[in-house]
Image: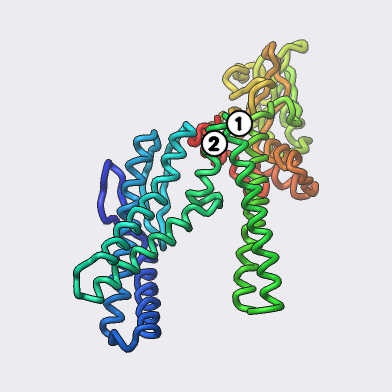
Amino acid sequence: MRSWQIFKIWGIPFKIHPYWFVILFLFSWSISNQVNLTSGDVYNTKEAWIIGFLTSFFLLSSIISHEVLHAFVSLNQGVKIKKITFYFLGAILQIDKYCQTALGNIKIAIVRPLLCFATAFILLLISSYSASQTPIFINIISRVGILNLLLGLLYLIPIGSFDGGYLIKSIIWYFSGSKNKGRNFLNKVNFSLSFLVLIFGIVCLFRFNFYYGFILSFLGLFGVNSSKSESQFFKVENILKFSKVSELRFKPLRKIEFDSNFSELNKLIKNRKDPSDKYFFVTNNGRWTGFINENILKTVSIKKWERNFVGDFKKPINSFESVYSDDKLWKTIERLEKTSEGYILVLNAADIPLGIIDRSKIGSFVLNKLGFNLPSEIVNKLIYKNQYPLGIELPRIINTMKQKGDL
C-alpha cells in the first residue's frame, strides 16, 4: 500500500502508511473500552470515545514529533536519510549512509527514549498540578504521559532493532574500539532473552494460559531464529570482507590456438560441457594473446570457415573484465555486477590468466564457508543460470556494509 507524505523537513519526506490510521482506530477503540469498564459511572460512551481518540491521536503525534527531533540529531551525526515512513508505534528510516562513529551512534540511540521520558514527565506533571476542572482533559494528558513512559522503556529493551540494542552496541564499540564486539554481545543477549521467553511461553502453554503461552512461545522462537540469522549474516559479512579470490575454485579456461580455423572452433563448441561458457582464450605457442566469443561464428559465412582463423578475430585480454587473485571478494563481486554477462577473469601477479569466476562460483564458496554443501544437481543449475544460490543477495549485503562504514 502506498504511503502519504505529510510534510518535508531538511529535504526528508515524512510519510504515513495507511496502517497508521488502522492503529489510531484500534487504540481509540481499546482505550474507550477500558474507560467504559473502569470509569463507566463517570464518563458516558461519547466521552469515552473522545478520551480514546484524543489519547491515541496525541500519542501517535508525539511519536511523530520525537522522530523529527531524532532525524535532526541523526543528520548532525552524518546520517543521510532518504525518507521516513510511520508505521504502528514507530517509523522506518530509509538510510543511504549511517553514522560512522561510536559516540554519534550513542547520541542517535538515546534521543528517542529521552524524548519519551521528557514528554511523560511534563504531561504527568501537568496532570498532577493542573488547576483545570475538566476531568476529560486530565484523563487524556495523564494517559498520554503514561504511554510515553512505557514507550520510552520499550525503546530501551536491548533488542537489535530497538534503540536499546543500538545503544548497547555503540557503548561497547566506544569503550572497546571494535564495532563487531558490540554486535556480537547484543546478538548473544537477544538469543538469551528470546530463549528465556520461549521457555516461559512453553510453561505457560501447558500450565497456565494457552493463548498467552502460544504468543510468548511464538515471540521467543522468532527471536531465537532472528539471532541465528544475525549470526549467519555476520559470518557472510566476514567472508566477503576477508576472503580473497584465490580461495575460490575457478572455471578452467578453454584454449584455442590462434591459427585454428572456424571449423575447428565449431567442433570445440559442440563438445563443450558447460553450455553457459561462451569464451575461448587464444594462445600462440603457449602465450596468451587474446580471447574470442563463440558468437563470432554467426558473423562469418559457413563457406568461409575453413579460410578464417580465430587469431584474426581475437580481442585483447585486457578488454576482458578481470581481477587479481589476491583481491578481496567483496571488491570482486562489485566488479562482477558491472559486467554485462556476469563473468570475470582472474589474473595472477604477472597478469597471467588463471581462470574464470561467476556468481555461482562465488555463491557456492560462501555457502561452503557457512557449512552448506549443495547437491550437484542444484550446483549444475546454478552454473547454467549464473545466479547466487538460495537467493543470497551478496551485492545488497556489500552495499549495506558500505553504508554502515564496515568496508
**Residue visible at 60% across and 46% down in the picture:** 186
Say whether residue 286 is left or right of residue 242: right
User: SS class of the residue under badge 1?
Assistant: helix
In the image, 172 versus 256, the foreground residue is 172
Q: Sequence-wise, which precedes: disc 1 or disc 2?
A: 1
Residue that label 1 marks: 330
Q: Is residue 241 above or below residue 35?
A: above
Residue 139 sits in which quadrant?
Answer: bottom left
Residue 309 seen in the current view? no
Residue 3 sits in which quadrant?
Answer: bottom left
User: SS class of the residue under badge 2?
Assistant: helix
Q: Nearer the observer, disc 1 or disc 2? A: 2
Residue that label 2 marks: 401
Residue 200 percent across, percent down from the top left = 67, 67
Image quarter (top left, top right, bottom left or bottom right) of the C terminus: top right
**Residue visible at 40% across and 85% down in the picture:** 37
Q: Is residue 146 above or below residue 325?
A: below
In the image, 256 versus 353, the foreground residue is 353
Residue type (three-letter) at the residue carrying disc 2 = Met
Dot 2: within a 10 Å radius of its alpha carbon, few (fewer than 14), some, or many (20 or more) residues?
some
Pointers 1 and 2 in contact (CB under 8 A)? yes
Residue 286 percent across, percent down from the top left = 77, 12
